[in-house]
Image (cartoon, grey):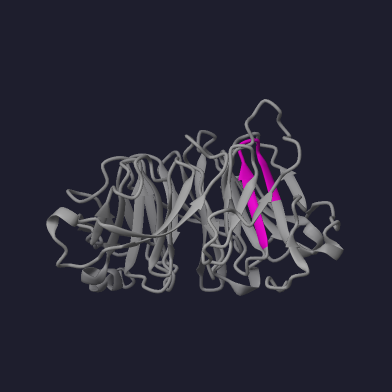
Amino acid sequence: MVERNSTSLVWNPKATNSIKEDHGKPIYCVTFNSISEACKDVFASCGGPRATIYKCLPGGALEILQAYVDKDESEEFFACKWSVSTDDPLLLLAGKNGLLKILNCTTQKLEWVAEGHGDAINDIAIHPMQPSLVLTASRDASLRLWNTQTKVCVLIVNGDGGHRNEVLSIDFHPLDGNQFVSCGMDNYVKIWSLEDMVEDVESSFHHNSNGATVFATKFLGSPKFSSYKVHYDYVDCVRFCGDLLLTKSVDERIYMWRPDLDPEEPIDTKGHIHLVQELELDDCAKIWFVRFAMDRECRTLACGTKSGTVLVYDPLTLCRRPVAKLKRGPSVLKAVAPIARQTAVSPDGDIIVSCCEDSTIWRYDLVSKEISSAATKPKAGAQAYGTARKGV
């Protein structure tokens, strides 16, 4: 691993590699496999009806391990996340058609299709301790908690205290799996708690999906915190940073803040927040569904821009400006804006990947000056994840 604190090391200002996926659709999501330490250099992308799995090799190379194409050509995947079943890596996909699809990358089979949302799914979050628990956020203004092990919908989150428009982004607390946060097009950020539903969640692991009984899905309608005071427009990305929250809107700012969770808080100050840090974004005004990512230690935050540049921050410092601006090469499709819709940071923070609207994926590495010019051509092949195939 590269020592990030060494003064002899710098962020390479140029991409170490790029690849253009041939489906010609915008790529909305990339995500590293942070569930398995052995697969920490593996990431997935999704765009159109396709998902592709890559491995980051030394020197900047990208190796294609698998590719999946949905049978429904009308599908357009907006989100992908990693989970695990026993020792098999699972790739979860969701998007336009409102279905959550679970792919087993070892057996190369579609394990389950979770149906229930009334519209598109915008985001997926995985429980930090129990990866079988999967949260989805939808255009239908609701969230759903699924148990992929027993194939049931555990919980539906909506109601009087729920969102009033599309839910765009969600995240679990990294240490307290009973807490999760959501944000959306109604400008609200909401924190939810499962503390009163621990027994219901536990019972979902004992349900027999092949039996005659139907699992009794629960409902959650009251968040423990709700505020529209953070941003004054769509909130399209939210992440926990310890007990703090990082949120982004369309106003070229990422805010780090602490919610006031005092149960005795006066009614006229409900939803009060305490601003901790403000990160300044460039080239991001008036554009939404551009989401940032962090490594597991929250030392590297990466966010894309309209021009495809990736801005890098250390959110734990007092610096408001990016510590690096990672620029890409010429756009592959000149007529398409190269908006970097989402980034992914490897678990150790050494690699950043961005995905763009011109069907391209870009890799950036934290490298020493001595090897900053090293680059190798992408390789196609298959190793631990089996051979690539079509037809999910």
Which residue is rendered at x = 21% and y = 68% of the image?
Answer: 262
How many circles with numbers are drawn on the protein?
0
Vertical comparison of 119 with 126: above or below: above
Q: In the visual, does 151 lie left or right of 267?
A: right
Query: Quadrant where the N terminus lies?
Result: bottom right
The answer to which image quadrant residue 32 occupies is bottom right
**Is residue 148 or residue 270 the one in the foreground?**
270
Vertical comparison of 391 with 313: above or below: above
Asked whether residue 103 appears in the rendered view, the answer is no
Question: In the image, which residues are magenta?
Answer: 351-362
The answer to which image quadrant residue 7 occupies is bottom right
Which residue is rendered at x = 79% and y = 57% of the image?
Answer: 61
Kindly report the secondary structure that dominates the magenta region of the rendered protein.
strand
Which residue is rendered at x = 63% and y = 68% of the image?
Answer: 40
Vertical comparison of 144 with 356: above or below: below
Expressed as whole percent of the image width and height from the top left, the position of residue 172 reads: 39, 64
- 355 part of magenta stretch: yes
- 1 part of magenta stretch: no
Q: In the visual, does 355 lie left or right of 169?
A: right
Which residue is rendered at x = 33% and y = 45% of the image?
Answer: 117
**Is residue 130 or residue 8 the one in the foreground?**
8
Expressed as whole percent of the image width and height from the top left, the position of residue 88 reads: 56, 68
Q: In the visual, does 264 lie left or right of 317?
A: left
Expressed as whole percent of the image width and height from the top left, the position of residue 309 reads: 65, 44
Asked whether residue 338 appears in the rendered view, the answer is yes
Expressed as whole percent of the image width and height from the top left, the position of residue 244 reads: 39, 65
